[in-house]
């Protein structure tokens, strides 16, 4: 599929800037096709590694059903959301990833993904992480999103400030 080019090219973030935002942020909103074809979006923690996004979840629910029915998804992260009331605008920076999401079945891959997530959110506690993985492996679902297209945008005011 060919993805739509950004209309306001001057405000477009580079791929490196988009990746940096995904690496530094801790959560975003996962967009899926839910029941009856309605969009289903859910806030979720993530870990970015080697061009992929990793998530963990309960083993059943609306999100899991949506993934099983349709792998196409999007994931949005807002890095900056600085409302400027007097200017009637917002100084924003955000990233949207488009791709396909799947559920990891292989235990080795699941453990590696859990280690990525655990080290991301609780670094320097390998013993605690291993205990948590051992305890939860049978009742946690691990999802991986293969990113096909990554785009980011920032407010024109931020672009102008960089140009000065």
Image (tube, grey):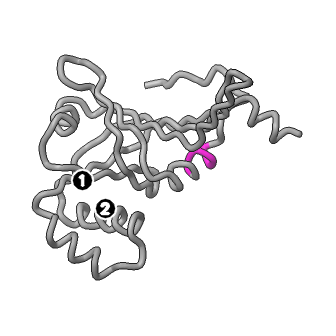
Label 2 vs 1, first from the N-terminus? 2
Q: Quadrant of residue 37?
A: top left
Q: Secondary structure at mark 2?
A: helix
Q: How many marks?
A: 2
In the rendering, at what x and y percent does residue 90 appear? Answer: 65, 29
* Name of the residue lying farthest toward the bottom: 127
Q: Give the residue displayed 62% in from the left and 49% down from the top.
A: 16
In the rendering, at what x and y percent does residue 126 appear? Answer: 33, 79
Residue 142, disc? 1
Choose between 161 and 37: the one closer to the eye: 161
98 shown above or below 113: above
Residue 113, disc? 2
Q: Quadrant of residue 85?
A: top right
Quarter of the image for the C terminus: give it: top right
* Name of the residue lying farthest toward the front: 86
Question: Do the residues under discs 2 and 1 have CB atoms within 8 angstroms?
Answer: yes
Quarter of the image for the N terminus: give it: top left
Magenta region, residue range: 15-19
Q: CA distance from mark 2 to mark 1?
A: 7 Å
87 shown above or below 162: above
Q: Secondary structure at mark 1?
A: strand
Lateral position of residue 60 relative to residue 66, left or right: left
């Amino acid at each position: 599929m060919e993805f739509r080019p950004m209309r306001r090219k001057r405000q477009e973030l580079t791929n490196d800037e988009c990746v940096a935002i995904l690496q530094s942020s801790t959560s975003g909103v996962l967009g899926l096709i839910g029941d009856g074809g309605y969009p289903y979006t859910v806030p979720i923690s993530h870990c970015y590694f080697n061009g992929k996004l990793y998530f963990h979840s309960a083993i059943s629910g609306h999100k899991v059903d949506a993934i099983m029915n349709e792998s196409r998804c999007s994931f949005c992260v807002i890095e900056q959301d600085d409302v400027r009331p007097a200017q009637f605008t917002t100084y924003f920076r955000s990233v949207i990833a488009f791709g396909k999401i799947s559920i990891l079945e292989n235990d080795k891959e699941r453990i590696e993904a859990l280690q990525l997530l655990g080290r991301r959110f609780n670094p320097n506690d390998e013993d605690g992480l291993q205990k948590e993985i051992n305890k939860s492996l049978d009742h946690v679902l691990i999802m991986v999103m293969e990113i096909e297209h990554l785009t980011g945008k920032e407010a024109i005011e931020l672009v102008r400030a960089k140009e000065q």
